[in-house]
Image (cartoon, rainbow, N blue to C red):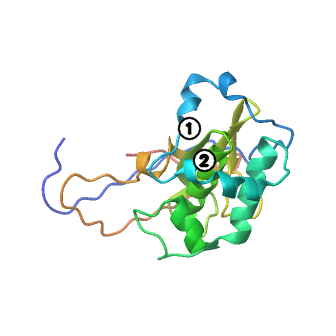
Amino acid sequence: MKIPQGEMRIEVDMVMVTDEVIAVDFEATATPVEQLPFDVLKYLLQSRYCPSDKMADKAQEIVGDAASGYAQVEAIRSWIHANLEYKYGVSSGSTDALDTLGDGAGVCRDFSHVGIGLCRALRIPARFVVGYLHRLDPMDMHAWFEAFVGGRWYTFDGTQDQPRGGRIVVAYGRDAADVAFLSNYGPLEMGEMEVTVREVLPGEPTPRPSI
């Protein structure tokens, strides 16, 4: 389908069921590489924005003597939250995890790349998640990461000071290159994007989705 030249407006409404809280399990251990599911193995490899092969020393420094698995990933998430400044204008479309560590600042996408790179450096599979977070202020497309430990994926978000649910997942990828919110193959100027996320309470009429 080819869109004709000129202004275009796209509206999408949907109702999503999400978990109120995210799972937390400090007892979840790292899964040996030889026991990882086949589709998880690719999340061990370095990628465009996550040069994990150059991040092993930093990863070991951050996790210290934390138990192998969930505790290590949480140590990474906590370090990111405490040591990186959330700041617009520092990063660009070419900024990778090493750049963000050097700058000491970035946005959610950058925080997630750092977390992913550090996890993979410890042989813990990690993937990039893009979506929306309920009550995020200001509301916008958000990014966080998941790590595979204890035989399953767990959610981690370096921008938040505590585990938060209400996450609407749009896509998973190795890093942001896999899940750009918009890919254009010709001249394009985006005028405005508005996102509203609200909770539908029990007994409240469910909004009728329309596309």
The image shows residue 122 at horizontal and vertical percentages of 68, 44
- The residue to which callout 1 is attached is 43
The image shows residue 134 at horizontal and vertical percentages of 63, 58
Which residue occupies the foreground of this view, 68 or 190?
68
- Label 1 sits on what residue type? Tyr
Q: Quarter-wise, where is residue 136 in the image? A: bottom right
Identified at 55% across, 66% down, the residue is: 100
Q: Is residue 77 visible?
A: yes
**Distance of label 1 from label 2 (alpha carbons):** 40 Å
- Label 2 sits on what residue type? Pro
Which residue occupies the foreground of this view, 116 or 166?
116
Q: Which mark is residue 205?
A: 2
Side of 50 relative to 68 (left or right):
left
The image shows residue 135 at horizontal and vertical percentages of 64, 63
* Image quarter of the N terminus: top left
Identified at 25% across, 66% down, the residue is: 189
